[in-house]
Image (cartoon, grey):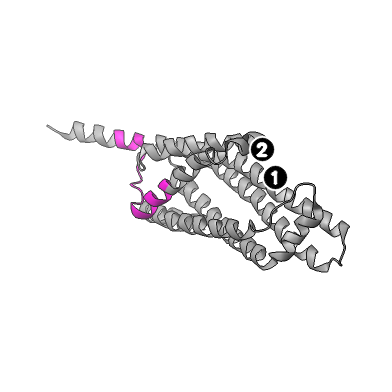
Amino acid sequence: MLKRIAQASPHAVARIAGVLYLADILTSVLGDSLAGSAHVVPGDAAATANGILAHQAMVRLGVAANLVATACYVAVTVLFYALFKVVKQSVALLATVASLTALAIWTSGSLSQLAATLIVPGRGVSGPRADQQVLELLEWNARASAIGNAVFATYCVLIGYLIVKSAFLPRVLGILMVIGGIGLLTYLSRALAHALYPYNAVPALAGEISLMLWLLLRGANHQTKAEAGQRITATSVSRP
């Protein structure tokens, strides 16, 4: 797959990444809105389980949408590595690892939501043990979301750095991604993130949407700053 990507034009790779990025955003918004219909009621396992019981179909649909979103962003991550490895391969590789790690953490949270919907139907009129399991699964989903955001913050900062260092995407996109990553770093403390929400998440959303739209509509003129400098120098030397 990587060989085929390498053979494709950078402009085409960027446009495909933009399409998949859009698919990721749309499906993740759908997934979060559906799966978020069942909330954790702190300290009340029975109420939490009843919430899942009342919204089983929606939660399962939301989990499915979130898994599709994850698959889309795995592809985006691979395409980004192909695009940015010419800027600095070690940083591009580190960004890839950070992105895949965050996606794995988020996926574990989504699967815990799915597991909660499978436990609830089997409980009787009163199933305190099942209720507690549901509560623990949904609490892990909340923790996984926060941990994943903190890891994804590193990815945003690294991608922003690569964009700034490149010459094939506007520097402002990189700056927006770095600012967004700094905002997501607040998820290292759940209390701090909760206190600052949504102001800590908006910059990351703005950066990702801006990057997605640019890739989707404009693609990329794949040329590093060093290559651009060499081309300018060669042009100057060739003039009489």
Q: Main secondary structure of the magenta part?
A: helix
Judging depth in this view, the residue of 233 and 152 nearest the camera is 152
Magenta part of the chain? 210-229
Q: Is residue 224 above or below residue 219?
A: above
Place of residue 130 in the rendered image (x, y in percent of width and height, measured from the top left): 84, 59
Secondary structure category for the residue under label 1:
helix
Residue 115 appears in the picture as rendered: no
Q: Circle 1: is it few (<14), some (14-19), or many (20+) Cα within 10 Å?
A: some
Which residue position is annotated with label 1?
A: 143
Q: Tell me which residue sits at (63%, 44%) in the image.
A: 148
The amino acid sitting under disc 2 is Arg
Q: Circle 2: is it few (<14), some (14-19), or many (20+) Cα within 10 Å?
A: some
Inspect the magenta stretch and tell me whether residue 224 lies in it.
yes
The amino acid sitting under disc 1 is Arg
The C terminus: image quadrant: top left
Residue 139 appears in the picture as rendered: yes
Badge number at residue 223: none
Task: Give the mark nearest the N terminus, 1 or 2.
Answer: 1
Judging depth in this view, the residue of 77 and 6 nearest the camera is 77
- The reply to whether dot 1 and dot 2 touch (C-beta < 8 Å) is yes
Badge number at residue 190: 2
Classify residue 115 by image quadrant: bottom right
* Label 1, label 2: how far apart the Cα atoms are: 8 Å
